[in-house]
Image (spheres, rainbow, N blue to C red):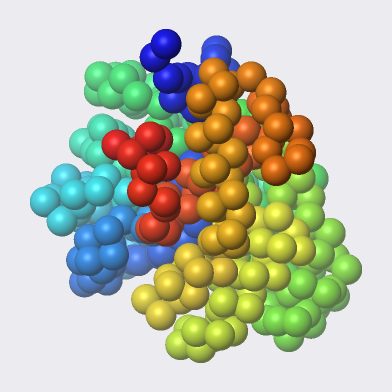
């Protein structure tokens, strides 16, 4: 009997959970995007890059900036095809131009498109519809993954509706705009730890973003750490985000932060080894229920461990050789 791959055996006829890098690094200028792509290639593609039109584009140079991002997406440096782009927000007149340029010229190369600052689900729906229309017009036949930033009261209120929209892959939490949107009711110290995890309004918002994302089978992504160069602070923030709230991805805005986030978001290696053993045994049993070290395992636990192992793989974690050959060769 031919051994079935986990994706074939565990997700027949349904969309599996997105397995994407646990770190998303933002870069706005051509210089910083180039450096980020070079670093991504050095590290073997363990993090995504978001090329930024929103904060990166100089005023009056929005068109040229979007065209630069297209050139970077289509360049030889983008060998992993793990670079997406953040467009302008719904209230900015340049968001449609961003979509026309980015999707029209690089719709097959961009890893995703990030939509910032919506205040209602209907805005996101319109923007996704426009992306779909431009993709169809330019013969882009793939679904372009959509990431949406939850950083306003309205978006938080409709987070579940936003997460359920088509082409969605990631729901991001934007801390600084969320705090500023409370008009001083949340102190600015809560843009940093420990306040960002302990203030009741922020903790509630983060929990709701994670709940909305996970309930709709998409990835929740955590905000940046403002201290750019402190590896341990970034790692501590990523660890709390992962273990206390359920975030599976986090933003980086400085190269030092990348390794800290990847390390913190990695599953415990003993669990990865255990998962590999369980999956290999399940494959031998044609994915029927098994007993492993005195415990019952079936498709529910197989799915859990398969997602764990895939996250470890995309994060550059070395897997046991037999599992590497069986599942990723």
The x, y position of residue 285, in whole percent, is 57, 21
Between 274 and 110, the one nearer to me in the picture: 274
Q: Quadrant of the C terminus?
A: top left
The x, y position of residue 249, in whole percent, is 55, 56
Total tally of numbered discs in the picture: 0
Which residue is depicted at the point 56% across and 78% down? 234
Does 121 sit above or below residue 237?
above
Does 73 sit above or below residue 283?
below
**Residue 291 visible to the viewer:** yes
Which residue is depicted at the point 61% across and 54% down? 271
Q: In which quarter of the image is residue 316?
A: bottom left
Between 255 and 124, the one nearer to me in the picture: 255
The x, y position of residue 18, in whole percent, is 52, 38
The residue furthest left is: 76
Does 284 sit above or below residue 88?
above
Q: In this view, does 254 lie to the left or right of 218?
A: left
Q: In this view, does 133 lie to the left or right of 156?
A: left
The residue furthest bottom is: 230
Between 199 and 97, the one nearer to me in the picture: 199
Which residue is depicted at the point 21% across and 36% down? 105
Between 186 and 227, the one nearer to me in the picture: 227
Q: Is residue 283 left or right of residue 242?
A: left
Does 99 sit above or below residue 179?
above
Q: Is residue 44 left or right of residue 266?
A: left
Which residue is depicted at the point 74% across and 74% down? 196
The residue furthest front is: 294
Q: Quadrant of the N terminus?
A: top left
**Residue 147 visible to the viewer:** no
The residue furthest right is: 200
Q: In which quarter of the image is residue 45?
A: bottom left
The x, y position of residue 277, in whole percent, is 54, 43
């Amino acid at each position: 009997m031919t051994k079935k791959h986990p994706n074939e055996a565990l997700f027949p006829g349904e969309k599996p959970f997105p397995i994407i890098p646990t770190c998303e690094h933002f870069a706005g200028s051509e210089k910083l995007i180039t450096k980020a792509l070079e670093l991504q290639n050095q590290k073997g593609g363990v993090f995504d890059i978001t090329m930024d039109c929103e904060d990166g584009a100089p005023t009056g140079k929005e068109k040229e900036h979007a065209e630069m991002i297209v050139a970077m997406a289509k360049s030889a440096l983008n060998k992993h095809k793990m670079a997406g782009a953040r467009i302008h927000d719904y209230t900015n007149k340049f968001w449609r131009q961003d979509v026309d340029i980015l999707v029209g010229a690089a719709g097959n190369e961009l890893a995703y498109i990030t939509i910032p600052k919506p205040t209602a689900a209907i805005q996101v729906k319109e923007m996704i519809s426009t992306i779909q229309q431009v993709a169809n017009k330019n013969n882009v036949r793939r679904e372009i993954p959509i990431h949406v930033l939850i950083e306003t009261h309205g978006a938080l209120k409709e987070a579940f509706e936003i997460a359920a929209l088509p082409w969605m892959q990631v729901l991001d939490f934007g801390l600084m705009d969320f705090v500023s949107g409370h008009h001083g009711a949340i102190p600015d110290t809560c843009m940093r730890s420990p306040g960002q995890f302990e203030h009741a309004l922020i903790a509630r918002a983060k929990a709701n973003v994670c709940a909305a994302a996970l309930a709709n089978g998409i990835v929740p992504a955590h905000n940046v750490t403002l201290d750019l160069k402190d590896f341990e602070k970034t790692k501590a923030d990523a660890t709390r985000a992962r273990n206390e709230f359920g975030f599976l991805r986090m933003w980086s805005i400085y190269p030092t932060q990348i390794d800290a986030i990847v390390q913190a978001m990695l599953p415990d290696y003993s669990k990865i080894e255990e998962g590999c053993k369980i999956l290999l045994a399940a494959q031998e049993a044609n994915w029927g229920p098994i007993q492993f070290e005195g415990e019952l395992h079936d498709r529910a636990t197989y799915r859990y461990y398969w997602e764990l192992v895939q996250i470890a793989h995309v994060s550059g974690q070395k897997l046991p050789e037999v599992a590497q050959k069986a599942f990723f060769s």
